[in-house]
Image (tube, rainbow, N blue to C red):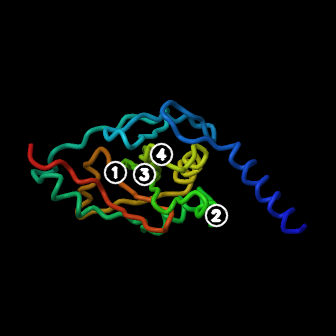
Amino acid sequence: MKRLNMTFLVLFFTIFTALGQKKISIGSFTSNGVTFKVSPATNKDWLHINPTNQRKNLANPDQINGVDLEYIMPDIKLSKSENEIHDIVREAIKADEMKNNTLNRTLDVIFILITLDPNQTEHKLKTVDFMVKANTLYTDAEIGNVYKSLIDKYRPVLSSKNNVHKQLKTYTIVYKYAARGRVVVGPPRPPRGR
């Protein structure tokens, strides 16, 4: 009888939790007071998610002091570690082991594109965008929680030799969050050859 009661309690909790979260689909959703636009990415197997209240990013110059950006970008250092962003995202998702195993999230990933203003002294994030698989198991509420946590908690500081990074308009960091606990961090590669 105890086992039967426990089974009903777990089932009730799972259904109650699922009712408050929706699968991510093309269109828009609001979470934590922020409205997000969901659109198909260039690759139709992926969705691009971004808050509607974000400013557009300015384009960086092709060169700084006569040196191509592709040679400058690797010399720019980021003060925060890969583990810090992973911890913030994992805490925001609050993915308990039972849910992960039930939903088989081990192969699901979230790409997080964070843009910084290299000249800003408060070290706040300028923009945060997401890319998820079209059949993702992550919900709109989880993406909203990740966004809010990053905006509230993540304060990276950029540095470079001779402060060359301050001549950039934006600096983008790409994170790959995987529920299985691996994070890949790096700046996007600038296009080669013009």
The residue identified by callout 3 is 112
**Of the residues tagged 4 and 2, which is closer to the observer?**
4
In the displayed structure, 6 sits above or below 43; it is: below
Of helix, strand and loop, which one carries label 4?
loop
- Which badge, 2 or 3, comes first in the chain's sequence? 2
The image position of residue 35, as x and y in percent, is 55, 34
**Of the residues tagged 1 and 3, which is closer to the observer?**
3
The residue identified by callout 1 is 172
In this view of the protein, which residue sits in the foreground, 186 or 45?
A: 45
Label 1 crowd bin: few (<14), some (14–19), many (20+), radius 10 Å:
some
- Which badge, 4 or 1, comes first in the chain's sequence? 4
Quadrant where the N terminus is found in the figure: bottom right
Of helix, strand and loop, which one carries label 2?
loop
> Residue 135: which numbered mark, if any?
4
Quadrant where the C terminus is found in the figure: top left
Question: How far apart are the alpha carbons under marks 1 and 3?
Answer: 10 Å
Q: Give the amino acid at mark 1.
A: Thr
Question: Furthest-right residue in view?
Answer: 1
Mark 4–mark 1 CB contact (< 8 Å): no
Question: How far apart are the alpha carbons under marks 4 and 3?
Answer: 17 Å
The residue identified by callout 2 is 96
In the displayed structure, 19 sits above or below 13; it is: above
**Of the residues tagged 2 and 3, which is closer to the observer?**
2
**Of the residues tagged 4 and 1, which is closer to the observer?**
4
